[in-house]
């Protein structure tokens, strides 16, 4: 069995690989993170949910700091934290349901007992009882009554019941949650492994025969999406080359080998060709809380040209790329890479007189996007807030 010392070694290994960019790409990073967190939940010793939450946050914080530009790391950590809370809440809810059913049975027995006493016993003088301190047969009813009253008082804003007492107690000891949490984590891992297939299965609903589709850069999600549609539909693809990385050349080669009619164009020809295009299908590095995209450089130009020509822009992405972070500073999500592909260092005199910035990503505003195709179906940008609420807890926005 893997011990705590081996677990720390696995954490440090992933942290170092993230720093050295040995693990790149949102999907690879997400899968590595999910596998590590499953190991953390399985190996670590804990019997309280708050201990596990703090442990996952600590490990997740190290991974996020190792590579802040990979937003998928933080997304998976937040998904796991929400998953842990949901399992705990479900367990507490089931316990309360069982307690309520037991209370109802005791209440029925008490009523039968009181009815018998009314028939058999002579009338007695009325007495006044202190219900809060009474410990007779009806004590369970009294305690549940007062707890319900306290909850209602707290709901109405009375200060007599503190919010801490009304909230869930994560300090409660739980000895049977680990198998359930591990099972849920395995479902998350399976979801990541089947991500591309689930998105590609929707291709026939969005691509029709004889269409002209434009894409930009190289995206594995878009590649499988287009190849799946090409099995039954005949259409043409226009690929922007995305200089200076020229990722579009790799994408065009892969699509042409699959028998798809593919044309590569320079980035400067995007606006001229857009009038002939039926729709734009692209991938993304991350989706922010407002529906904006962090995508490969050149995407902003494609989306703006599509907006001018009223061409729909469809984004293929998995839910693991959906981030609850808001782009208050768009440049903080960008990354500058070596300027050598733009202007070689052999230029000598010229390179000493200019400053060259080579951004790797573009920020695409949400009003330029028409539809998101995720592994759970198609969603408009206005629906993303609902997906964020379903997958993340507000307490985990900052890890």
Image: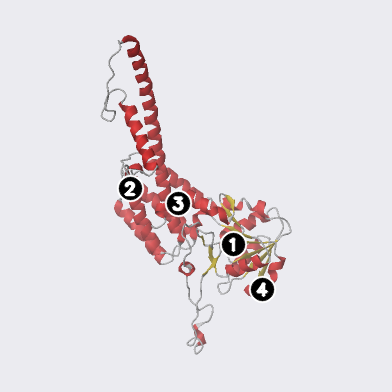
Q: CA distance from mark 2 to mark 3?
A: 17 Å
Residue hosting label 4:
269
Quadrant occupied by the C terminus: bottom left
Q: CA distance from mark 1 to mark 4?
A: 23 Å
- Residue visible at 28% across and 30% down in the picture: 132
Residue 39 at what x, y percent from top left?
38, 50
Residue hosting label 1:
367
Q: Which mark is residue 6?
A: none
Disc 2 is placed on an element classified as helix
Q: CA distance from mark 1 to mark 3?
A: 24 Å
Residue hosting label 2:
50
Work out whether 106 lies above or below 33: above
- Mark 3 and mark 4 residues within 8 Å of each other at the beta carbon: no
- Mark 4 and mark 2 residues within 8 Å of each other at the beta carbon: no
Q: CA distance from mark 1 to mark 2?
A: 40 Å
The local crowd at label 3, few if under 14, some if 14 to 19, many if 20 or more residues have their Cα within 10 Å, is: many
Locate residue 368: give its quadrant.
bottom right
Residue hosting label 3:
392
Disc 3 is placed on an element classified as loop
Please say whether residue 127 is visible from this viewpoint: yes
Disc 1 is placed on an element classified as helix
Side of 280 relative to 4 (left or right): right
């Amino acid at each position: 069995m893997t011990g705590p010392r081996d677990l720390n070694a696995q954490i440090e290994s992933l942290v170092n690989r993230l720093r050295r960019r040995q693990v790149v790409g949102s999907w690879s990073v997400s899968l590595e993170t999910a596998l590590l967190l499953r190991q953390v939940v399985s190996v670590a010793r804990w019997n309280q949910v708050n201990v596990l939450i703090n442990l996952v946050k600590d490990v997740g914080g190290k991974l996020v700091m190792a590579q802040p530009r990979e937003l998928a790391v933080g997304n998976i950590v937040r998904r796991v934290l929400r998953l842990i809370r949901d399992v705990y809440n479900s367990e507490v809810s089931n316990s309360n349901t069982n307690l309520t059913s037991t209370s109802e049975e005791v209440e029925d027995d008490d009523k039968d007992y009181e009815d018998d006493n009314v028939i058999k016993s002579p009338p007695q003088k009325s007495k006044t009882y202190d219900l809060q301190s009474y410990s007779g047969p009806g004590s369970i009813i009294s305690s549940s009554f007062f707890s319900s009253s306290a909850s209602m008082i707290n709901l109405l804003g009375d200060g007599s019941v503190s919010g801490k007492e009304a909230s869930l107690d994560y300090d409660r000891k739980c000895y049977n949650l680990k198998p359930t949490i591990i099972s849920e984590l395995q479902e998350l891992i399976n979801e990541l492994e089947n991500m591309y297939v689930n998105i590609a299965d929707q291709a026939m609903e969005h691509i029709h025969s004889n269409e002209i589709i434009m894409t930009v850069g190289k995206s594995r999600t878009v590649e499988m999406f287009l190849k799946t549609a090409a099995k039954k539909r005949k259409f043409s693809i226009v690929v922007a080359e995305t200089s200076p990385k020229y990722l579009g050349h790799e994408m065009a080669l892969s699509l042409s080998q699959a028998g798809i009619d593919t044309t590569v164009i320079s980035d400067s020809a995007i606006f001229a060709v857009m009038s002939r295009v039926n729709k734009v299908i692209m991938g993304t590095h991350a989706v922010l809380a407002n529906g904006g995209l962090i995508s490969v450089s050149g995407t902003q130009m494609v989306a703006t040209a599509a907006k001018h020509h009223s061409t729909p822009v469809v984004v293929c992405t998995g839910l693991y790329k959906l981030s609850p972070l808001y782009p208050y500073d768009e440049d903080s999500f960008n990354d500058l890479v070596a300027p050598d592909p733009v202007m070689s260092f052999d230029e000598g005199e010229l390179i000493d007189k200019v400053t060259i910035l080579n951004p790797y990503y573009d920020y695409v505003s949400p009003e330029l996007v028409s539809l998101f195709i995720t592994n759970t179906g198609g969603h408009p940008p206005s629906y993303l807030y609902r997906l964020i609420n379903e997958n993340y807890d507000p307490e985990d926005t900052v890890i």
